[in-house]
Amino acid sequence: MIHLSADSAVASVRAVLVHHPSIVERTEHRGLPITTVPRTLLDLAPMVPFGRLRRAVAEAEFLELASADEIADALGRGRRGSRALRKALALHRPELARTLSALEERFLSLCEKHGIPLPEVNVKVCGFMVDALWRDEKVVAELDGRAAHGSAAAIERDHGRDLALRLAGYNPVRYTWRQVTREARVVASDLRNALNLN
């Protein structure tokens, strides 16, 4: 479905839904009129799951399309989507923009829910791209989805990475999708021990 904002009496047609806001906030991209990023986020807010909205806010800031302050300026009393977008800004986590999978997003939510400081996400350590890093504590968390980590070769590679990280003074820990989604308390407890938070 394509969504358009128009200030004239343009009607919706199949696969194109036309919105008629009282004010159309527009800019241009490659010569085409488009709504501003903050306005787009406001329009998106009531239509998508909250987690997706939070990620969109993080990506807008990460890609330098709009700052948190510019997004906040789009909010307004009685403006549809303001409540959800205000909540997304209050819970804004720039780290979400760097996640590459649903598992990484779920892992950050687990950390947030259990009061664990959020790690750096998808950064290089000892030549390896790691899923999560607590730099000061020298703890690396790797998140193992079955597709990328289920074969014998992948398991061997993962053990080699862990060994190299340990030799460099890091403490690697690994969690699966099932552990992150179904055993969150156990994962949180293990992570708190690794980070010396207990």
Image (tube, helix red, strand yellow):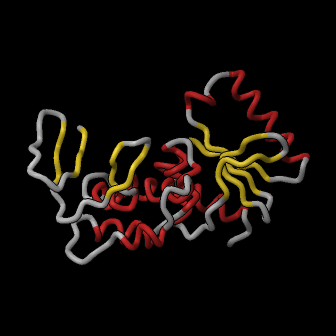
Residue 155 lies in quadrant: top right
In this view, the residue in front, 92 or 136, is 92
Q: Residue furthest bottom?
A: 77
In this view, the residue in front, 11 or 90, is 11
Which image quarter holds the N terminus? top left
Percent x, y of residue 164: 86, 40
Percent x, y of residue 176: 57, 42
In this view, the residue in front, 100 or 170, is 100
Percent x, y of residue 185: 53, 60
Percent x, y of residue 48: 30, 52
Residue 24 lies in quadrant: bottom left
Q: Is residue 156 above or below residue 77?
A: above
What count of labels does the image hold? 0
- Horizontal side of 170 relative to 94 (left or right) equals right
Residue 36 lies in quadrant: bottom left
Residue shown at 76% from the left, 29% from the top: 157
- Horizontal side of 128 relative to 197 (left or right) equals right
Q: Is residue 104 above or below residue 112?
A: above
Q: Residue furthest front?
A: 31
Residue shown at 18% from the left, 38% from the top: 16
Residue shown at 82% from the left, 40% from the top: 127
Residue shown at 56% from the left, 61% from the top: 94
- Horizontal side of 195 relative to 46 (left or right) equals right
Which image quarter holds the C terminus? bottom right
